[in-house]
């Protein structure tokens, strides 16, 4: 049985969420005809956004040490691509990183367009809505978690947010939004996702591991 098929079965057995969205999300891990093209789309989209938007507007003028912290939505897409290509027990850290980063960027975009309507374009709307849905799907399908995996997955979004708020690496678009609104958005979004992660950990502690590393 393939790893992706194992992930789908484990998710269905383990997850307490029985909505149609949950069943649809499991397809991300069970059907290579969807998972692999979606991973390629995310990776290509992330690279394209870096090249066309973030590099000329922000990264070119920044220190190379901070490049990874600037294109948040592009990094979210690339993390999602990695998670889709690595859907087993060993990829849980990346999966959680991608989930939190995608949801935060999706929510941040909708806050952004409330203040700056010029960023409301069909392409940006579809892309960020896609990130938001992918982030939720990844969290729903993550299955059982170990404490070390949870801490590892939460670490990247936490470090990235801290760097963004203390340096000039915040995305050029979010700089146009009142910083108090950005902080509240990030805190509320991440807090909800951390509580969700804790709930998964509590369920994991009462269950046997659903996958074994191969």
Image (cartoon, grey):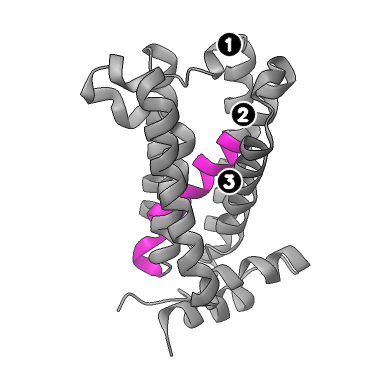
| Residue carrying label 2 | 108
Q: Earlier in the sequence, mark 3 or mark 1?
A: 3
In magenta segment, residue 43:
no
Q: Position of residue 27 (x, y in %)?
A: 60, 72
Q: Taking the image as drawn, is residue 150 in sight?
A: no
Name the front one of labels 2 and 1. Answer: 1
Would you name the residue on which mark 3 appears?
Answer: 131
Q: What residue do we see at 30% from left, 79% from top?
A: 214
- Find numbered disc 1 in the image and state the secondary structure of the residue it sits on: helix
Residue at (45% x, 19% y) in the render: 170
Residue 195 versus residue 42 in the image, above or below: above
* Magenta-colored span: 88-106
SS at badge 3: helix
Q: Secondary structure at mark 2?
A: helix
- Residue 123: percent from the left, percent from the top? 63, 39
Which quadrant is the N terminus positioned in? bottom left
Say whether residue 167 is left or right of residue 36.
Answer: left
> Percent position (x, y) of residue 135?
57, 50
């Amino acid at each position: 049985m393939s790893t992706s098929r194992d992930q789908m079965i484990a998710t269905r057995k383990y997850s307490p969420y029985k909505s149609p969205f949950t069943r649809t999300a499991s397809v991300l891990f069970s059907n290579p005809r969807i998972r692999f093209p979606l991973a390629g789309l995310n990776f290509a989209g992330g690279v394209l956004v870096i090249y066309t938007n973030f590099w000329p507007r922000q990264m070119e003028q920044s220190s190379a040490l901070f490049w990874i912290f600037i294109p948040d939505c592009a990094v979210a897409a690339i993390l999602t691509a990695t998670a889709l290509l690595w859907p087993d027990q060993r990829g849980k850290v990346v999966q959680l990183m991608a989930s939190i980063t995608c949801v935060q960027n999706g929510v941040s975009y909708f806050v952004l367009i409330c203040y700056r309507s010029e960023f409301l374009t069909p392409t940006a709307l579809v892309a960020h809505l896609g990130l938001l849905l992918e982030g939720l799907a990844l969290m729903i399908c993550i299955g059982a978690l170990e404490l070390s995996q949870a801490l590892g997955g939460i670490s990247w979004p936490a470090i990235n947010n801290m760097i963004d708020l203390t340096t000039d690496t915040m995305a050029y678009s979010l700089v146009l939004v009142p910083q108090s609104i950005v902080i509240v958005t990030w805190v509320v979004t991440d807090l909800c996702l951390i509580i969700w992660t804790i709930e998964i950990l509590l369920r994991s502690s009462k269950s046997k591991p659903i996958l074994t590393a191969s």
